[in-house]
Image (cartoon, rainbow, N blue to C red):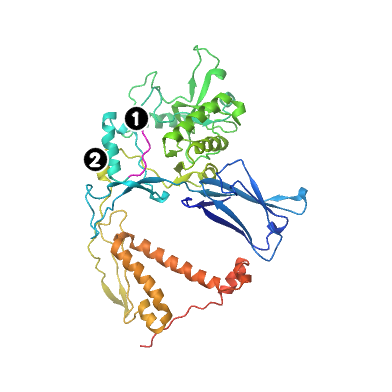
């Protein structure tokens, strides 16, 4: 499955899809997509199609107007006869949402010195577009934040430190411990609990591990003594019958759970899974699975209730963290997030990334964060986070001879904190490789040399030193793409619009040359 992330449509733009020449798509091909070809709003269920030309000599190009956020699915169908039509593999274009935020004043002075909070990063009246890569998200956990009367101080601290998104914590309400403590699931049936449970070493190991964490571990919840409210281990079932002897097949509900490295698209509480019987799950005793079925017709009230709840959240918040979605059916997640985006088209949705999540995220139009940290949110912890830049002492590089061959020995300093960057610089004696020097012999390079000089001077004058390598790579990359584009645009139409192989073959004729002066 092909997954491509596209930038936000701050200004509507055209996405050009190009299909190589001489592909089967030219055989009565049709390009199908739910991208609104008229430039309107995204609708997942509305598909349009574009008939493709039957020309094997040129690539096929389809222009898609992009004006709103959305996950655009596409595929190609082709074939001589209707009964022999072939559907290609589906791909996805995920158009990022537009996020707006209050602007802030610069954090550095004109001399590149950090400004104090009173004059640096001060909120302004106007708003600016916030790139998704600029999001700085701080998760807050209520049990670490103290009484609600102290929360405002924590939020103020996070704001002063530049966090741009803060998921709201929730205090305990009955059995609930987070903002959303129901789990959307489908087809959970009592049949999976029939039969004799497996009583083996796994069960004993599970009980021992849970007891250690829940009651003894310094970082655990420390539940204390074993009581009816806090049993030996978390129960796998919630008993909601009106009487103690109520029929368990009717009144027992499966509690939700999660499993290490599990496939998010598989329901761990539905046969053929035996995760519950094998004690492979970490269960949440305060959270029950919901039986949504295959669609609203299977449980109209539940679908209506969840949809109403989801849309009310979308009207209140700018983004969703889809957490604890383990074994949530894809069709349920898609439907609920589509409903939320009707209320807020630029809703931001994210969850932790791994290989199996990518397909799920492509369907629900979610963004990804690389990792998350459970850090207590208090002033002491925030002040302990790395937020200073300093230069280390220069590294002394001893010189020596080995069989009359000179060498240099580099020793990494003993004090080398995480995140540090060491830059190495080498020199060729009596050699000047500067572009300015080359421009003296090749006059047409003077403009190019000036282009590089302007950008590198600006980087040195305005960017923090630790970002210089990143900006250097960006400048070189843009220069290469410009040079490549300049060459390609001078090729014939046959090369310019032809197959990639033709273009690569033509580029072999382009020679890169320079001049090395004799010493």
Q: Is residue 251 left or right of residue 24?
A: left
The picture places residue 454, in percent across and down from the top left corner, at 35, 69
- Name the residue located 49 percent from the left edge and 33 percent from the top edge: 280
- Name the residue located 46 percent from the left edge and 41 percent from the top edge: 347
Classify 203 as above or below 473.
Answer: above
Q: Is residue 151 left or right of residue 97?
A: left
> Toward the viewer: 204 or 105?
105
> Toward the viewer: 315 or 231?
315
- Name the residue located 63 percent from the left edge and 44 percent from the top edge: 47
Q: Residue 221, which numbered label?
A: 1
Within-10-Å neighbours for mark 2: few <14, some 14–19, many 20+? few
- Residues drawn in magenta: 163-170
Label 2: which residue? 380
The picture places residue 443, in percent across and down from the top left corner, at 41, 82
Classify 484 as above or below 49.
Answer: below
Q: Is residue 150 left or right of residue 127?
A: left
Tell me the quarter of the picture where residue 102 sits. Answer: top left
Within-10-Å neighbours for mark 1: few <14, some 14–19, many 20+? few
Chain-order first, disc 2 or disc 1 = 1
Classify 457 as above or below 402.
Answer: above
Q: Is residue 3 left or right of residue 219?
A: right
The picture places residue 442, in percent across and down from the top left corner, at 42, 82
**Which residue reaches farthest bottom?**
518
Q: Does the segment drawn in magenta span residue 166? A: yes
Q: Main secondary structure of the magenta part?
A: loop
């Amino acid at each position: 499955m092909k997954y491509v992330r596209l930038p936000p449509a701050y200004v509507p733009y055209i996405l050009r899809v190009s299909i190589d020449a001489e592909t089967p798509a030219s055989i009565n091909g049709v390009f199908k997509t739910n991208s609104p070809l008229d430039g309107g709003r995204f609708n997942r269920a509305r598909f349009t199609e574009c008939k493709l030309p039957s020309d094997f000599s040129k690539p096929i190009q389809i222009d898609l107007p992009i004006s709103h956020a959305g996950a655009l699915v596409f595929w190609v169908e082709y074939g001589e006869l209707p009964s022999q039509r072939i559907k290609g593999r589906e791909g996805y274009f995920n158009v990022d949402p537009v996020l707006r935020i209050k602007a802030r004043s610069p954090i550095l002075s004109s001399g590149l010195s950090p400004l104090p909070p009173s004059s640096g990063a001060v909120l302004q009246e106007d708003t600016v577009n916030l790139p998704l890569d600029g999001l700085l998200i701080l998760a807050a956990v209520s049990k670490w934040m103290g009484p609600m009367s102290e929360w405002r101080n924590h939020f103020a601290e996070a704001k002063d430190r530049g966090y741009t998104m803060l998921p709201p914590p929730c205090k305990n309400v009955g059995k609930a411990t987070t903002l959303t403590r129901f789990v959307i699931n489908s087809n959970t049936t009592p049949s999976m609990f029939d039969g004799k449970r497996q009583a083996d070493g796994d069960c004993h190991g599970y009980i021992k591990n849970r007891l250690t964490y829940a009651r003894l571990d310094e970082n655990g919840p420390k539940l204390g003594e074993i009581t009816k409210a806090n049993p030996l281990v978390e129960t796998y079932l919630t008993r909601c019958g009106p009487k103690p002897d109520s029929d368990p097949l009717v009144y027992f509900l499966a509690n939700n759970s999660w499993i290490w490295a599990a496939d998010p698209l598989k329901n761990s509480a539905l046969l053929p899974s035996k995760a519950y019987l094998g004690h492979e799950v970490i269960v949440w005793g305060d959270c029950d699975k919901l039986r949504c079925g295959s669609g609203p017709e299977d449980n109209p009230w539940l679908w209506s209730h969840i949809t109403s709840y989801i849309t009310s959240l979308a009207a209140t918040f700018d983004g969703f963290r889809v957490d604890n979605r383990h074994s949530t059916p894809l069709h349920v997640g898609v439907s609920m997030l589509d409903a939320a985006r009707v209320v807020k088209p630029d809703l931001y949705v994210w969850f932790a990334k791994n290989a199996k999540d990518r397909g799920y995220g492509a369907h629900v139009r979610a963004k990804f964060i690389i990792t998350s940290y459970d850090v207590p949110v208090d002033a002491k912890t925030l002040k302990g986070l790395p937020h200073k830049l300093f230069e280390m002492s220069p590294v002394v590089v001893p010189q020596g001879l080995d069989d009359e061959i000179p060498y240099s020995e580099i020793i990494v300093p003993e004090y080398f904190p995480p995140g540090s960057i060491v830059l190495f610089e080498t020199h060729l004696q009596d050699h000047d490789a500067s572009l300015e020097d080359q421009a003296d012999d090749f006059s047409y390079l003077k403009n190019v040399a000036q282009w590089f000089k302007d950008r590198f001077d600006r980087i040195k004058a305005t960017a923090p030193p630790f970002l210089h390598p990143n900006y250097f790579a960006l400048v070189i990359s843009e220069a290469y793409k410009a040079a490549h584009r300049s060459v390609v645009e001078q090729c014939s139409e046959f090369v310019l619009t032809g197959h990639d192989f033709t273009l690569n073959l033509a580029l072999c004729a382009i020679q890169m040359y320079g001049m090395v002066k004799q010493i």
